[in-house]
Structure formats: structure tokens, C-alpha cells
Image: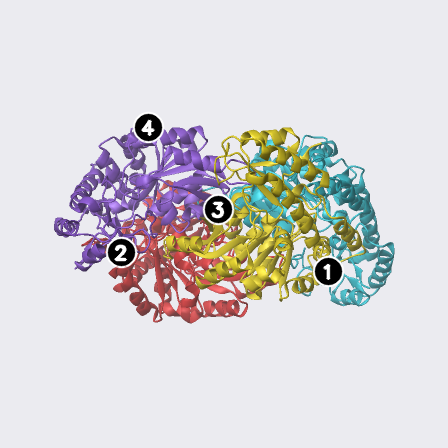
Chain colours: A yellow, B cyan, C red, D purple
Amino acid sequence: MARYFKSDNTATASPRILEALVEANRGPARAYGDDEWTRRLESAFARLFDHEVRVFPVATGTAANSLALATLVPPWGAILAHEGAHVVRDECGAPEFMSGGARLLLLPGAGGKVTPAAVEAALRDNPPTVHTVQPRALTLTQATELGTSYRPAEIVALAALARERGLAVHLDGARLANALAFLGCPPADVTWRAGVDVLSFGATKNGALAAEAVVFFDPARVADFELRRKRAGHLVSKMRYVSAQLLAYVEDGLWLQNAARANALARRLGAAAGPMLRHPVEANEVFLAAGDERIARLRAAGFEFYDWGAEGSGEARLVVGWDQPEADVEALEQALAGCAATGAGRVPAVTSRAGRP
Amino acid sequence: MARYFKSDNTATASPRILEALVEANRGPARAYGDDEWTRRLESAFARLFDHEVRVFPVATGTAANSLALATLVPPWGAILAHEGAHVVRDECGAPEFMSGGARLLLLPGAGGKVTPAAVEAALRDNPPTVHTVQPRALTLTQATELGTSYRPAEIVALAALARERGLAVHLDGARLANALAFLGCPPADVTWRAGVDVLSFGATKNGALAAEAVVFFDPARVADFELRRKRAGHLVSKMRYVSAQLLAYVEDGLWLQNAARANALARRLGAAAGPMLRHPVEANEVFLAAGDERIARLRAAGFEFYDWGAEGSGEARLVVGWDQPEADVEALEQALAGCAATGAGRVPAVTSRAGRP
Amino acid sequence: MARYFKSDNTATASPRILEALVEANRGPARAYGDDEWTRRLESAFARLFDHEVRVFPVATGTAANSLALATLVPPWGAILAHEGAHVVRDECGAPEFMSGGARLLLLPGAGGKVTPAAVEAALRDNPPTVHTVQPRALTLTQATELGTSYRPAEIVALAALARERGLAVHLDGARLANALAFLGCPPADVTWRAGVDVLSFGATKNGALAAEAVVFFDPARVADFELRRKRAGHLVSKMRYVSAQLLAYVEDGLWLQNAARANALARRLGAAAGPMLRHPVEANEVFLAAGDERIARLRAAGFEFYDWGAEGSGEARLVVGWDQPEADVEALEQALAGCAATGAGRVPAVTSRAGRP
Amino acid sequence: MARYFKSDNTATASPRILEALVEANRGPARAYGDDEWTRRLESAFARLFDHEVRVFPVATGTAANSLALATLVPPWGAILAHEGAHVVRDECGAPEFMSGGARLLLLPGAGGKVTPAAVEAALRDNPPTVHTVQPRALTLTQATELGTSYRPAEIVALAALARERGLAVHLDGARLANALAFLGCPPADVTWRAGVDVLSFGATKNGALAAEAVVFFDPARVADFELRRKRAGHLVSKMRYVSAQLLAYVEDGLWLQNAARANALARRLGAAAGPMLRHPVEANEVFLAAGDERIARLRAAGFEFYDWGAEGSGEARLVVGWDQPEADVEALEQALAGCAATGAGRVPAVTSRAGRP
């Protein structure tokens, strides 16, 4: 059987999360979030983030991101985003749809990170007149789509700039746990304390079945979020089953344990990749600039993963799941070490990539 | 503790559906529907409906309805719907949102049912010119929002008229199982064989955690549905967990067993209600015209349910869940019998109702 | 040649308005409203309405109505409107489009007028929950689509009720001049002084080529209107040519003169119609309940007009233009008098109508 | 008084076009395009383009562009456009709005021109999957926003590539007359014969008051355009006054005469600019890389024009109107010659620009 390194979405759910579903399945509970699990969420997340929060469970990361962004910008607004961000590349225009047609302004940036200079340039290039879309939000991704993690100070600087220029700040935390496991800092340090207004909190990739949440650190930002969520078909009726997943995910540190395991395995792969490694491994993803021939060889050896970048870029992405079998990683380590030792063909330095989730 | 008759959304999930989740949780599986459970869905549903189908899992009924309707009508289209339909009253404008602004044309009709005469009148009143919205779809609900069920011949007549007038036909089957358990006919008889083009197939209210599906009987109607679903944040990444619920729901008749139990209990309540019964009990809902005083008495006795109709209408809705404790029903039977025996206050014949899910 | 009584849109432009275009055509002028004509508009309208205003020229009445309404309600909002209103029947869903999918709640009402009771009933029927669209605006039409005019006190009562219930008030004044010419009151009395927040001010039907304006009486309501207008393609670049039309229309009373002439001619037709007259003539429209046979006879005599109501209703609408030839009116007067004298066939009392501009 | 070189939108209307309005103002005419002027449009444009066409008048260029593009792409579609195009920089997101949220993919290109290589790169970077927006149209601008004109062969190559890759081709012809006056070729050579499917035909900037048209060369592409136009408030009721402008504009060559005059004057300015000239003058616009100091000097001398590019870029745009006084041009020629002779400060080579119409 193939060994999957395609996406953390191929992983199973944590047994403890399944157990939580079974426990939540006792007797009736009011629908649409008026249940004890959902009520517990806000206090659990308040403890987690050391700050008052409003938490709204939804079923997918695309829903979390696009509903959060739509709450921050008007239809004629513009959202500054890294050109490789999930909202840009992998959501089929969901931010545009949910917002009623806002525009994404694409920012370059090494390692998948937005820089203050790129923010400044985008704002300079889009001055506000009645003829133009109006920049109103900045979205960051933590960990980034290239497996790197913003340091708290980086987010502080970006958010301060954003705020000064009238932009709200959204953080796509589909892999927030992986970033925190890498950084070792409290969740607050990369969210509200750093200036983030709204967070897409992901659990699905890291051990849940389907559980994400939009977390507002500023109650004023919530605005009409609940009506937006309902109207988009994302108000789950038996919400206890989503909330129970989220509680099990965070209440006893499961989220960081799962992430730490995946990160550690990814680091081993990064080490094995040697000079083929494209970006520092600061989460659970490993990017290779290996050349087409070596990539073909890895694939022939039974490893499943995505090519990265444009056709013929010779790049590949390896994602390690929270439940990745140790044996998969060992096998891939050896294969990578073998590859690295071989003389490679030309490895073009193409940075853009084909859109893939 | 209160005895819940508010909504079938307060019910638990069937143990067999939870077991199916546990079984599906073994080893990696490709994401976004490229998994064995989702692949099995189409053949399972083809057997169920005795017809080739395309099946698309989603997480909520609002998503199923509004995505299905948006696929059938353009932004300037109009959708004929019963004035009490869920898409009209309980989805916060989701059909308008998903379709880019199509209009719902509201049809009256006794017992929650659309009639051919109402369809004809609506079409006569909305002739196609460049100045007007364009009727393009008819949506029916089975079982209806008032707990009645269309007979196959009723759907045949409505769908034939719709087709003749250029309207596609959508069926909101959030309680399809309850209707089928009542009618005792094959699923085909109230869907494709009767002229239905697209079905919202519900499982959540009748034993799933969160599992609905859009079922197309005509592949040509699928069009861009998959892009619409993704863009609205309804393409679930670990789809196996939704598909596994749906498979467990239909493969061994669980859906009809659950519905039959709920229907039978509801019928007992209907019988106990005697002259207070507002509509025939043809699914798992019971509507009372009991007068405000008797309604208050029921509530004081510990029964939770919704008022129905406008304030002071003296009407109430009782919904029986698939897992409703027998004891709840017995207690309510006795309470109803007691009420029915008492002289009631004036019971106004108000038919509209406050919007509630 | 046919004698047109189809619509005031078939009329010519007033010579004085064409002269104003010629006068405005001297030398360069800044684009997009930064010109002397557009600047004069706000003071001219402030004098007209005896109140501070913000005035935004647009090219069509549909644009004025739908942009104004979109500014008042969120995408999940609902707009209360008479079931026969232009925004309901003749704008192809423009309010839904401009607002991002808001819903029109249709109110019945004799003579084309909304009543407080109908507003109350609609609000009772649409209580605010997260599951439902949210009523946020009331739109009235002055003169109504049935040629009647709200008295100031009627608007006062409706607007007070609206305000109390959290609804903004919009007035569709496509035929405001006709209503004012009939009522003889100052423009303020049926607009801001009566509680209207935003007005669609029409000139096209009554002597302009293409000139309408959105008038805000409360600066806070303007919000993002200018961005909405631009984004919808309604920010005219050489705006002086629209503004010059509006100035010529109002600065010397042309608007009321034109309207008064049309109203007077319509009243003559109303008198000639005798018992066939369907609604009081309080503007420039005359509605007949004449029976199909008499309608056919009028048409055969060379008069062009629209049937009204459903097929076979036996109703017709006659509209008198500001420039209607006296001879047309005389000829129609005689024809109507002849009809009225004849025994009619059955004249069914159908009130709805086929959608027509 | 200032001498305006800000925009061709500051120009007057051609006297012949005003005369046409006066001529069209005789007697009644059916509304909404069912008039003799609008009917004549299609034959007049068919002669002009030597091809069967469908012509739809609208009032603004933004309306023409965004309605045309919305007809070509679904809400999840993507439109390839030059990064400096009017639809990108100056329409406040109208394409996103009209299309229901489609995305603009921004292409670089010298002189404001899209290249086949940029199209290929954008398509490579946006491969079609269910997770991504779907490229469906290419829009070109003729003359471009930088005053250059595509040669017929350039459009042929781009359109052939587009067609092969499943993209429809739209041409923004706000300054089509200027391009044709420069190229000296038949209109067909840069439109349908070169592979263009839909054209935004502009007249406003070049002598009309407010008259643009969407021209379809393929009737199948018209689809629901008329409903889109109505719904967006762009179906002008007294359409004869728009159509009459368009007829006067094209029937006797006025459009090319006006454009030729403006082009010739612009060429004189280009020659005077000498080494400061940024792009070849192939229409009625002149771009200077003059340095901030010289730009300030020109402005101090009473010339009104826009800065171009980012703040401090030292660039400026001069636009010559069809009616530009000869004296303005002479004065500016001398001023430019004076500037060119002076040693300039550093002139940074910034290519992007602040958004301006």
C-alpha cells in the first residue's frame, strides 16, 4: 500500500475525539449551539487564549476563513494575502463569494510569509478613491503554506502596521497547533496579544473529523457573523458533535501532542532531505527542491505526495499526519537520504505552485 | 428534566452511525471524497432509488437546499415554494445567497402542500419579460413542514406541470424517511419517477450526527455543483466521515426503522390530541390548535415544544425524535388527553407561523 | 399613427432640459461629479426640500431604488414593499442583486398603498431569529403604481411605525412630481418631514432624458453609497450632463408644471371613464376595469396601452405623458365615454397584474 | 484658467451628438429599446464591423465592461487582465460585483499590453481543480491604459491562445476610436476578425455625453445579457437618447475624426517630451517620466494632469480630449520642450501606478 504524505487531511481522527462523540451522544440536547458542549467552548477557549473570546464552530476551514474575512471587509473591500495562501489558492474563490465580491490583493514573500514591506507596497499601490477597491483586512497563515512559522514579533509588526492603516487582522490557523508546537509559546502570543482580531482555528487536519472554529478576540468584530454563518449553511444543527470534538481537542492538550509528534517526524524528513530542503521545517510540512527525476523515483518507491510549483519545477511537498506511521517516516527518510546522495538534475528555482489543498 | 418535543435536531445519533465512524477511522484515506466510503455512496443510493444518481454529501440541510436550488436557477431566477417551507422561513435567506439573489415566490396551500393551482397562479402573476425575475424552479418538501406527506400522484402532477412550464423540480427531503415510512412506497415513487430532478436527502434529523446529501437524478443538472459546493465551504475534507454516516443510515434500512418508530409515536400523540389536532399526522410532527391556556398548561407540565403561528395563535408544534423515550410519549399522551377533555378557550384559525427551524 | 398611453417613458424630453444640456456643453469640466452643475445640485435640492440633503445622480430609476435599498439593508435583510411596487414587479430582482440577496416581503394594500396593519402583520410574521431574514427597511411609492398618492399623514404614520420597529424608510419617487402636483403640499411634507430617510427622485418619466437621483435626508445613511454606485457602474463620468438635467427640472418649477399638465389630462380621462374607473386619479395614471371586449375596442381605435392584472382581468392602464398631445386625450375621452355608455361584459375584480414597467 | 489634460472625460460632447439628441426628441417613442434609433444601431454597427452583431447600449464604460465580463464567466471564474487595466484599477471591483465574485488574475506586460507568455504563465499557475477559480476569459484594452495600441496580429495571437485554452475574449474599447485612428485598419481587424467575442464600445470619452455599448460578435454569447443589464439598473428607459448618440458617433465617421484630432495633438506632445516620453504615443495619451521637480513645474504653469505610478515616481499622464483647444497643446508643447532641455532629477523607473480613472 502507498505511504501517504499528501495531506494531513488523509489522517484519521484521534481516538479521544471519537470517544468524545460517543460521550456527547447521551440524551437530547438543544440544537444550533444552545447545548452544554458549545457553551463550554467559550470558557475553554478563553482559558486557552488567556482572553475573552467568542467562538463559533463550523465544519470546514474554507468556511471559517471566508466567513471570518467576509465579516471584516465590505463587498468593495480588499484583503491583503500572501500569494500562496490557502484563501488564494485552494478555496475556489470562497472569500470573494462570502464577502459579496471583495478582492484579494496578492503579496509576495519568502517562505510563505507576508512582510511589512509587501503590505506597504500593496497599500501604496491601492490608494483609496471612489474608483478603487478599499483595503480593509490583512490575512496571515500560521503555520504558513510552506511549513514555516511566524515568530510572535513578526506578527506583532505586521498587525501594528495593519492597524495603523485601518486593516483588520485575520489569522488562518488551520495548522495553528503545529506552529505553537514549534514555537513553544502561548497561543496568545501569536494571536490577540500580537494584534490578531479574528482567528480561523483548525482541528480537522490535526485529529478531528470535521471541526473548525472562528474565534473573535474583539466582541465588536462579531457583528453579524451569526447571520452570515446561518445564511451560508454553516450553522450545524446538532452542534454538540462539533463542539465536543473541539473540546476534546484542546482541553487536555491533545492538539499540541498531535502536532508535536507530526512536527518531530517532519523534522526527521527535513534532515534527511539535506540540500534538497526548500524551506526550514517549522511545522509538519517538508518542501523539496529535488528535481523531476528524483521526485519520480520517490513516487515509484510507493510514496504519495504532491508536486509543488509549476509543471517541471522539480519541487514536491510532503505532509506528515498526526498519526503518520513511524515506519512510513523511516522508509521515506532512507529514500530521501538515498536521493540526496545522488547527483541531481537541474532544480529550477520556481516559487509559484499549482493550486492544491 | 424537560421532555423535548422541540425538534428532531435535539435527538442523539444512532449507535450504528457512531459505530460506522469508528470503523471508518482505520488508516489513511484520500481527502475531499476520493475515498472508498464516498465512492460506495453512489452505488448505495443508486440501489436505494433504483436509478443512476450523483450524490454529494454536505453537512447541513440548509447547505443542501440552497446549493441545489442555486444550481437550478440563475441569479435573476425565481423559485416557487410553499410559503411555510424551510427554505422560506428557516434558512436566513440562504437560497438568495447561494443563487446570487434569486427570488422565492411564495405559494399558499393547505397542510403545507403546494397545489397545481397555486403554481399556475404564480406563473400567471410572473410572466417572463426582461423586467421581471424568471421562474425556473419549483421546490417541494417531503414530508412537509406541517407533518403531512405528498402522495406520489400529487408530486407527479406538480412535477409534470413544472416541467411543462420550464421549471426544474427540487425536493427538500429533510424528513424524506418519515414520509416514506408513512407512505410505504419505494423512494423512487416520490422522487425521480414522479419527476423530481434534485433531492436534498436528509439524515441528520433522523439519526445522523451531521450528514446530508444532494442527489441529482439527471447528470446534466449537476453542472457546476461541485465548484459551488467547494466555494461555499461545503466540500468537507475528511469526507469519509460524512459518507460513512450516510452509508450506515441507508444500507440496512436504519433510516426507515428510525422514521417508522418516530412516526408511530407521533400518531399516538395525534390520536390523543383528538379535536385539537390541526393536520393529519403523516410523519413525525403533530400540530395542535389547543388555545393559549392549554398550551401553557402543557408547558408547565414540563414538555418543551415550539408555539406555532403568530403570537396568540394558540397553536403548537410537537416533534418526535427517532430516539424519543417511550415514557415521554406516554406522559404527553396523557397530558393531551386531559387537555382535550377540558373546554378550550377560543382557538383562532391562524395559519402562518413564526419562523423556527 | 397610434396614440400612446403606454408609459410616461415614451414621452419626449422637455425643451428646457435639452437647452440645459447645450448650455452645459461649454468647455471642460471635471469628471465624476466634481463639476459646478453637480455641486449646485445639493443646494438646489436643499432649497427644494427645505432641509440639508446629499444628492447622488444616477441614470435609471432601477439604479436609484436598488442602490438606495442596498444601502439600507444587509444581505440578510428584508425589505417591506407593496406587492405591486416597481421594485417588486419591474426591476428584474435589482434590489436582491444590489443588496447581495436581501428579500422583499410583499404587503397587500388597496390602491397600491401599504398600510400600518400590513406592516405590523409582516413584522409579526417575520420575527428576528438567527434562522430568518431580518426586516430592516420599508419602501413606499409616491405616487403609487396605481396612480394614487399617499397623503402626508399616511406617510407620517407608516414611517413612525417603521422607525419604532427599526426599519429605515425609502420612498420611490419616480412620479413624485405627479404626487406633489396633486397634493399641493411642499416636498418636505411627504419626505423627510414625514419620516422618509432616503428618496429615489425621478425626472426621466416627467421630462428628462435620463436623470434620476438618490437623495439622503440623513447624512449618516449615506455610508458607503458612493462606493456602491461606482461599483455598480452608475457613477457617470461626464456627470454634468445628468446634473444639468436635474437642475433644469427643478430650479424653475418645470417638474411641477409638467406633472400638473399630465395630471389634469389624466383626470379628464378618469372622469370620462365613469364607472369603469378602478382607482381615484391622483397622478397621471388611469386604471380601467372595462372588460376585455371594451378594452379590445379601445385598442382597435388606435390607442396603445397596457392590459393590467392577470390575463382576462379586463383591466387596463392608461398613462398620460407630460407632453401628451391634447388631441390624444380628447380622442380617448370620447372613446371612453362611448365605452362607459355601453353595457359591459363581466368585469372580474382581479387585483394582481402582469409585471410591466 | 487651468488647461485640462486630466482625462478625456472632462471634454465636452460633440455638437453633432447634441443635435442628434434634439432630432430624437420629436414625438413619442417606445421605451426600453423598442424604438427606431436602437433598431438602427444593429445595422449601423453591422456595417461598421462588417459582421453580424448584437448591440446593447449602456450608460457607462464600467457597466459595459463588467456586464460583458459577467456574461462570459461564472462566479467561480477567473478573468485574465493586464495589471494596469481599467477593470482592475478603476472600477471599484465592478467585475467582481457583476459576476457574483469572479477573480481577476493580474498579468504583467510592458506598455500596458498582455503577452501570450503572460497568459500561459497565468494558466500554468491556475490549473483547473475543484479547489481553484476557473480561468474563463481574457480581457484586453484597446487602446491600452498606457496609450499604446495592440497591432491586429498581437490580438490574433492572444485570442487564438485564449480560445485554445477555453477562454472567451473581451475587448475594452473605451478608446477604440483612438486605436483605430492610429492603426488605420478596419474595426473588424482588431475585433471579431482577430478573435474578440465581446466588445465594450466606448463613445463617452470621445464626444458623447454618456453612451457606451456592449457589442457581441457571437449571438450565442449574448445568453442572459439582457436580464443582467436590466437587473443592474442599466436598461435605460428612454433608450433612444443613448442610441441617437451612438448613431451620430459612428454613422458619418465622427468617431474617427474626433479620435484622429486628439491623437495628432497627443503626438505633438509626445514629440515635445523627447527623452521624457515613457511609452510610444499610439492614441491620445502621453506618459512622462519627468521627475517630480519638472512635474511640479508643469503644474505650477497651470496644466492639470494626474501623477502616475506610486508617490514619488516622477511620472505623469497627459490625456488629450477630442476638443482640446489647440492653444492648450501649444502651451504644453513649449513647456515640455523647456522641461526636456533642463537637467532632470532622478527619474525612478516605477511602473505601477495609483488607481485613477
Same chain for labels 3 and 1? Say yes or no: yes
Determine which residue is flagged by label 2. C240
Query: In front of the other: label 4 or label 3?
Result: 3
Q: In the rendering, at what x and y percent does residue C211 appear?
A: 32, 54
Relative horizontal placement of residue D258, taking residue B191 as reference (left or right): left
Residue B328 location, quadrant: bottom right
Q: Residue B124, relative to residue A250: is it above or below?
A: above
Asked whether residue A356 appears in the rendered view, the answer is no
D217 sits left or right of B282 in the view: left
Labelled disc at residue C246: none
Mark 2 falls within which chain?
Answer: C
Disc 4 secondary structure class? helix
Q: Secondary structure at mark 1?
A: loop
> Residue D109's x, y, as percent?
35, 39
Q: Amino acid at mark 1?
A: Asp
Name the foreground residue: D307 vs D41: D307
The residue beneath circle 4 is: D193
**Labels 2 and 3 within one chain:** no
The residue carrying mark 1 is: A35
* Mark 3 or mark 1: whose residue is earlier in sequence: 1
Distance from Cα at disc 3 to Cα at disc 1: 40 Å
Mark pair 2, 1: CA separation:
60 Å
Q: CA distance from mark 4 to mark 3?
A: 36 Å
Q: Residue C322: x percent and y percent? A: 30, 55
- How far separated are the C-alphas under marks 4 and 2? 37 Å
Which quadrant of the figure has residue C23?
A: bottom left
Amino acid tagged 4: Arg
Same-chain check, marks 2 and 1:
no
